[in-house]
């Protein structure tokens, strides 16, 4: 299996499934792509057994993505999206996070009059489609830490210390503990959070609660030592969570204009791609786009300080992507507004 370094910052002309199959597992931080929709946009957009083909490249995406990585892909056909979501749920470890709507017609856009022309077309028997969709997946639940707190091996030393001191102090039940710390005597109270090593909401007692436990004559390890050990481990576990740098700018409907003078029939706007990259990766991360088209993802990675891997079947679009990248590398550093 090849080392990931040989793929970095390159546009690779080839079949996405074949190229990804040679990449090492768990090697990319963000997988962001705009695959063919199978709606006849061009010759490359007509694929037999489309769902099976998607299953092959999505399976490879799962293999090469890191455990704390994120997976985004575009589509515009809702019946197909429903089938793909069902397939992903049944056949992968991906956890669905969000269906984002890219709204292409909104107040304030520069070419709204042009887009309005599509809406007033006569003879329509359905609503004019002015949106595409973006599906967001990770391998984790909302926090990514529930399995950490539910795992008896995580924070094992600290948990063991509390259990040992509880037994030495003769505190046999949760009621015994809660009586000392002033928590409720009904149910488990706070004691279950401190002494049940399998509790999904296990936590370190506060300094105030710990001081009350010390009145038993036990629990004499300095609290600051425990807190520092806990924080060090917590930060280590935090790195296992999927990246989400909340930009405080977006909800699940995004207003972005389509690309004027596009060099590819389905080219996505750089600010939209930059928004995904900024939310779901950090500077220096590796971003893979297995259907890179004219290279928008690669160009945006350069502008945002990320490493890119682009795969594209068409030699024509590979050349366009390379020219865009070369032009970007010759420019001073730019920041894309989102």
Image (tube, helix red, strand yellow):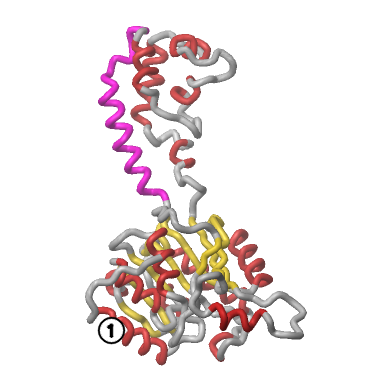
Task: Judge whether residue 158 can be spotted in this image.
Answer: yes
Magenta span:
216-241
* Direction from residue 102 to residue 78 in the image, left or right: right
Residue at the spot 56% in from the left edge and 83% down from the top edge: 114
- Which percent across, then down, holds residue 220? 29, 14
Task: Judge whether residue 244 can be spotted in this image.
Answer: no
- Which percent across, then down, holds residue 319? 36, 89
Residue at the spot 57% in from the left edge and 69% down from the top edge: 133
Asked if residue 43 is positioned above or below residue 277 in the image, the reply reads below
Residue at the spot 51% in from the left edge and 68% down from the top edge: 255
Callout 1: SS: helix
Q: Main secondary structure of the magenta part?
A: helix
**In front: 229, or 331?**
331
Q: Please tell me whether residue 218 belongs to the stretch shown in magenta.
A: yes
The residue pinned by badge 1 equals 327
- Which percent across, then down, holds residue 217? 33, 7
Asked if residue 46 is positioned above or below residue 236 in the image, the reply reads below
State the image quarter where residue 90 is shown: bottom right
Residue at the spot 44% in from the left edge and 33% down from the top edge: 152
* Direction from residue 81 to residue 212 in the image, left or right: left
What is the tally of numbered marks visible in this picture? 1
Q: Please tell me whether residue 100 belongs to the stretch shown in magenta.
A: no
**Number of other residues with Cα within 10 Å of mark 1, as a class: few under 14, some 14 to 19, many 20 or more:** few
Image quarter where the N terminus lies is bottom left
Asked if residue 72 is positioned above or below residue 184 in the image, the reply reads below
- Which percent across, then down, holds residue 70? 45, 60
């Amino acid at each position: 299996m090849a080392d990931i370094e040989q793929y970095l910052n390159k546009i690779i002309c080839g079949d996405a499934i074949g190229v990804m199959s040679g990449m090492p597992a768990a090697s990319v931080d963000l997988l962001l792509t705009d695959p063919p929709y199978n709606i006849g946009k061009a010759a490359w957009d007509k694929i037999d057994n489309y769902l099976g083909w998607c299953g092959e490249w999505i399976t490879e995406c799962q293999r090469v993505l890191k455990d704390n990585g994120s997976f985004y892909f575009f589509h515009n056909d809702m019946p197909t999206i429903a089938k793909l979501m069902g397939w992903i749920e049944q056949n992968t470890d991906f956890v669905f996070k969000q269906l984002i709507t890219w709204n292409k017609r909104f107040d304030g856009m520069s070419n709204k009059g042009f887009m309005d022309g599509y809406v007033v077309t006569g003879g329509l028997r359905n609503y004019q489609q002015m949106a595409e969709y973006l599906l967001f997946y990770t391998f984790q639940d909302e926090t990514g830490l529930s399995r950490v707190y539910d795992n008896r091996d995580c924070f094992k030393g600290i948990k063991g210390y509390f259990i040992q001191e509880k037994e030495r102090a003769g505190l046999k039940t949760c009621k015994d503990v809660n009586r000392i710390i002033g928590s409720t005597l009904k149910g488990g109270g706070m004691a279950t959070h401190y002494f049940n090593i399998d509790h999904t909401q296990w936590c370190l007692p506060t300094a105030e609660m710990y001081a009350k436990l010390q009145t038993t004559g036990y629990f004499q390890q300095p609290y600051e030592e425990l807190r520092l050990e806990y924080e060090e481990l917590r930060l280590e576990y935090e790195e296992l969570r999927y990246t989400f740098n909340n930009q405080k700018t977006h909800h699940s409907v995004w207003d972005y204009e389509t690309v004027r003078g596009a060099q590819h029939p389905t080219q996505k706007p750089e600010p939209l791609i930059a928004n995904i990259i900024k939310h779901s990766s950090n500077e220096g991360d590796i971003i893979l786009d297995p259907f890179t088209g004219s290279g928008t993802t690669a160009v945006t990675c350069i502008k945002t300080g990320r490493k890119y891997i682009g795969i594209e079947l068409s030699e024509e679009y590979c050349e366009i992507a390379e020219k865009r990248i070369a032009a970007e590398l010759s420019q001073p550093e730019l920041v894309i507004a989102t």
